[in-house]
Image (cartoon, grey):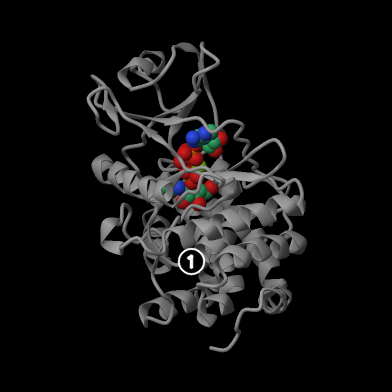
Amino acid sequence: MRKATYPPENIFYQFLTEGSQQSIVATGSGHIHDTWWIRNADSNNPDYILQRINSKVFPDVNLLMSNIITVTKHLKDKRLDSDPMEHLEVISTKENASYFTDAEGEYWRMFRKIDPGFSYDIVPDPDVAYQAGQAFGRFISDLADLPHTMIQPVIPGFHSVTMRYQRFRQAVESDPCKRRQQVTAEVDMADEYLNRMLTIPELERTGKLPIRITHNDTKLNNVLFDHHTRAVCVIDLDTVMPGLSVYDFGDSIRTAANTSHEDETDLTRTNFDTVIFRSYADGFLQSLGHLLTPEETHVLPLAAQTITYIMGIRFLTDYLEGDHYFATHRPGHNLSRCRTQFTLLKKMIQQHTFCTDTIGELLEKHQLSQKS
Ligand code: ADP
Ligand code: GN1
Ligand code: MG
């Protein structure tokens, strides 16, 4: 957590919150913002989630929040009374703004807490993966009629392989923290895999994959569950932008089908879980399959590899640059994360045929066309 200068306990009354603040505790395992859970003293009123926005990662806070407001409003309008899924609800400030700026120039925002709202860093069982797939698939499907001009790219090139690779090479060449010697094996791996990872970008460049409004940060802990392990809400909408549906699929597989934590240091624990791959894909195709083109379904397995590669080089770049982007909690944390990604990637590639066959079977199961 970044050093807090303005006390988070003083923020509650800046917003149009109901009830009163009983307690405030740091929560969540996200890598970007600082997050607190505010318990309401009055049990008839909701709890809240307070975040101090990371404005180094999101310098245009107006744009960030305006995208989120547009998306949450659209999802709200889509929601039926009987709907089991909730949408994220942004709480306005007393000045009717979507965020509060403190005296130190830090930005804060508030959400109604989804309750219960459990998040998993590791999948406990295949049904959770199915539910997550269904929720993230539905997210894209619900936004399919939102005009793209309503959402502006908040981090341009977020999933661009070439941009991420160039940035990585710059970090290798400049080696500002003199760490390159420790990572020669990882640098070699990044170079060796690059070619394979350029397939999807080429399909995107030539218009063979449609651009949709996508979430772009579909890691497993960005979907919340109730007590009965039913998905109830997709959160972390910061990176909702025009993008590729297949990368949303891929980023969930990268996290959900990894048998270890993202920062595991014992790499023998990092394996690719094919049962989870199948369950997640089943849920994703159940809710989004009707919209996906054959070109999209064809590259789902490769998209999981590509996103895992991107994350591997992003963690490695941050390690080489001195750990200024992702929150780290120990020396070498980003390097551990990079190593799990490359280990997982290797195992995903070994299972490529299995994954392709599985997608084929699921397309039949959901009676979806496979011709491209
Ligand atoms: P980051 O970008 O840092 O990952 P998130 O928006 O994902 O930030 O929030 C971090 C964590 O806070 C989530 O993983 C979740 O546990 C919790 N959280 C965020 N928003 C809510 C919410 N509306 N209701 C319940 N929990 C939430
Ligand atoms: C960050 O915010 P969080 O922790 O859900 C990152 C994602 C990465 C992820 C890796 C804005 O996501 O792109 O996939 O870490 N978000 C941003 O765990 O860079
Ligand atoms: Mg998150």
Where is residue 289 shown, x and y percent of the image?
57, 71
**With respect to residue 272, does 353 lie above or below?**
below
Seen from this angle, which residue lies furthest bottom? 371
Element on which disc 1 rests: helix
Is residue 341 among what the camera can see?
Answer: no
Query: Mark 1 — residue?
Result: 245
Neighbourhood count class around disc 1 (C-alpha, 10 Å): few under 14, some 14–19, many 20 upward: many
Residue 175 in the image, given as x and y percentages of width and height: 41, 52
Amino acid on which disc 1 is placed: Ser
Left or right for 113, reference 282: left
Query: Which of the two residues, 215 or 285, is positioned nearer the viewer here?
Result: 285
Report whether residue 302 is seen.
yes
Q: Residue at x 43, y 32 (%)?
A: 111
- Whole-percent x and y of residue 112? 46, 30
Residue at point 37%, 83% (across, down): 206
Q: Toward the viewer: 99 or 115? A: 115
State the image coordinates of residue 288 (x, y, percent, origin top left): 55, 66
Residue at the farthest front position = 81
